[in-house]
Image: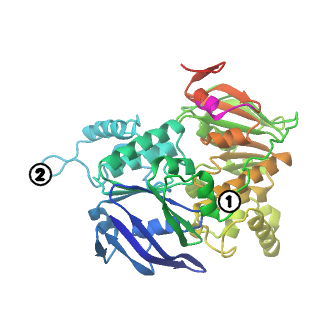
């Protein structure tokens, strides 16, 4: 179906791809794996026409393609679900779904907006299981819901090839399972799939073959049968990864954060919990349960209509981000690209963005102190960048995430609110981030870990709070908590001995 032959691509100071060949068969699901910075996204951006390759050629159904533009790609039937959501926040769901392919009537090609919105709601529910009004603004959807709108839009184009780049990174297990059903149906219809993911269990479950990239070069292409997760880790990183989760830290009895009766105008109500110094508290729930917006509301009072948030016994009041930083609160957002980094600034500028006072004398930045601080953090988090002045937009997604975390380490925060901190991050980088979270807790920081990754929650958290329809319905604590218990609770279930009872 598709061949990319001897593809090369370089950026200033970085050779992103070197003689990479990739082949996709008709109707197969082909996994593309590698560490952050291995070249996966660059290869797919070349396929999408976002980047132009320096050398090599692309063939589609046996024919060599000359100019590789967005129009050509669309005509050939190749669709992309990018890791970064390509949506216009001020369009409605219906407008975004049918943009450029709007159903019209009369010779004037008029649009019946009410019918368009009804049709959007119907199509979304039928194809991806998303229940949402067609007149709702895309910017008001969660990141996961935006992802499902993009997937549905791709399905409306009658594609021959669909590229899924980290499609489940922000989806709960139930939504991910629905996506896998969609992908298997596509395969039955002879649609070829390129599936990029750091979740190797998913790769084994759903893919026919995998291609492994490392440091911009192809390692191998192999069939999935008989492969283990350990085999894939070894191929990906070229070394053995030790157990990702250290022994859990014992927190102090001193309460750092206390949330009382916190109520959001739409997303959650009457939320009560606390985080002690040195404690990692996990929060999870199905998409739309309110756990994602809870972190933002604590950080900047977003959407809060009632309740009190206290840090070290003192009410925070109606905080703004600059006030939260001054109080010692760091927030790693779910949408790192749009909310966590400033894309046009350098790695150095992004890392010190929240802590300029620490490297300044009055209003003048001490550049020597700043560069020393940044160099130390780049080394500590193993950020892959040619230099400090590299635009952060040129880094891979996982390295951008490390920059976001470094920004808050630089600020010396007391409380870290981490919203999906390892979404779309490779297995090696995950281990490094987990180690850092443990280290911060040991140093006495409080960690609020908001995540859809159940293994991550169980492996890291001292306690796990489960939200369901805007309320905390369960608290799981102890060394014997399992991912199955968390999943049952997320779905509104009750634990009854060894039986899982879904209410």
State the mark number for residue 402.
1
Q: Which mark is residue 348?
A: none
Q: Splitting the image into 4 quarters, where does residue 407 fall?
A: bottom right
The answer to whether any part of residue 97 appears in the image is no
Q: Is residue 483 magenta?
A: yes
How many other residues sit within 10 Å of disc 1, few (<14), some (14-19) or many (≥20)? many
Q: Is residue 384 left or right of residue 94?
A: right
The answer to which of 130 and 186 lies nearer the viewer is: 186
For image coordinates 80% across by 50% down, the residue present is 440
**Residue 79 placement, left or right of 486:** left
The majority secondary structure of the magenta stretch comes to helix
Residue bounds of the magenta highlight: 480-487
* 479 versus 360 height, above or below: above
Which percent across, then down, holds residue 346? 64, 70
Q: Earlier in the sequence, mark 2 or mark 1?
A: 2
The residue carrying mark 2 is: 107
Horizontal and vertical percent position of residue 122: 31, 36
């Amino acid at each position: 179906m598709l061949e990319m032959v001897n593809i090369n691509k370089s950026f200033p100071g970085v050779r992103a791809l070197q003689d990479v060949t990739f082949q996709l068969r008709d109707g197969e699901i082909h996994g593309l794996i590698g560490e952050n910075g291995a070249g996966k996204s660059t290869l797919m951006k070349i396929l999408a026409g976002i980047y132009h390759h320096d050398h090599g050629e692309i063939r589609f159904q046996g024919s060599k393609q000359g100019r590789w533009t967005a129009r050509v790609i669309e005509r050939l039937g190749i669709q992309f679900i990018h890791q970064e959501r390509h949506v216009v926040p001020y369009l409605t769901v219906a407008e975004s779904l049918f943009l450029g392919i709007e159903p019209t009537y009369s010779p004037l090609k008029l649009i019946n907006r009410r019918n368009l919105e009804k049709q959007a709601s119907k199509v979304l529910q039928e194809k991806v299981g998303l229940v949402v009004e067609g007149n709702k603004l895309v910017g008001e959807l969660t990141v996961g819901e935006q992802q499902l709108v993009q997937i549905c839009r791709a399905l409306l184009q009658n594609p021959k090839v669909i590229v899924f780049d980290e499609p489940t990174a922000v989806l709960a297990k139930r939504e991910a399972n629905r996506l896998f059903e969609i992908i298997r149906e596509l395969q039955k219809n002879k649609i070829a799939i390129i599936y990029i993911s750091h979740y190797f269990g998913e790769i084994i479950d759903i893919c026919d073959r995998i291609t492994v990239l490392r440091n911009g070069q192809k390692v191998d292409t192999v069939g999935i049968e008989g492969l283990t997760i350990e085999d894939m880790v070894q191929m990906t990183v070229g070394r053995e990864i030790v157990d990702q989760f250290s022994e859990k830290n014992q927190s102090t009895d001193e309460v750092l954060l206390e949330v009382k009766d916190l109520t959001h105008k739409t997303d959650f109500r009457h939320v009560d919990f606390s985080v002690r110094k040195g404690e990692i508290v996990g929060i999870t729930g199905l998409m739309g349960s309110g756990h994602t917006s809870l972190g933002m509301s604590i950080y900047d009072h977003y959407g809060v209509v009632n309740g009190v948030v206290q840090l070290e016994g003192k009410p925070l009041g109606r905080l703004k981000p600059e006030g939260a930083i001054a109080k010692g609160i760091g927030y790693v957002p779910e949408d790192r690209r749009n909310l966590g980094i400033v894309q046009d600034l350098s790695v150095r500028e992004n890392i010190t963005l929240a802590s300029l006072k620490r490297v300044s004398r009055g209003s003048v930045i001490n550049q020597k102190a700043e560069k020393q601080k940044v160099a130390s953090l780049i080394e500590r988090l193993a950020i892959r960048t040619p230099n400090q002045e590299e635009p952060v937009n040129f880094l891979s997604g996982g390295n951008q995430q490390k920059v976001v975390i470094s920004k808050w380490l630089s600020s010396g925060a007391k409380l870290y609110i981490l919203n999906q901190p390892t979404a779309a991050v490779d297995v090696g980088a995950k281990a490094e981030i987990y180690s850092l979270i443990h280290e911060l807790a040991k140093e006495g920081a409080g960690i609020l870990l908001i995540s859809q990754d159940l293994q991550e929650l169980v492996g890291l958290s001292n306690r796990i709070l489960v939200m369901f329809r805007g309320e905390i319905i369960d608290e799981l604590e102890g060394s014997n908590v399992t991912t199955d218990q968390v999943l049952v609770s997320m779905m509104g279930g009750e634990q009854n001995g060894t039986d899982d009872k879904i209410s």
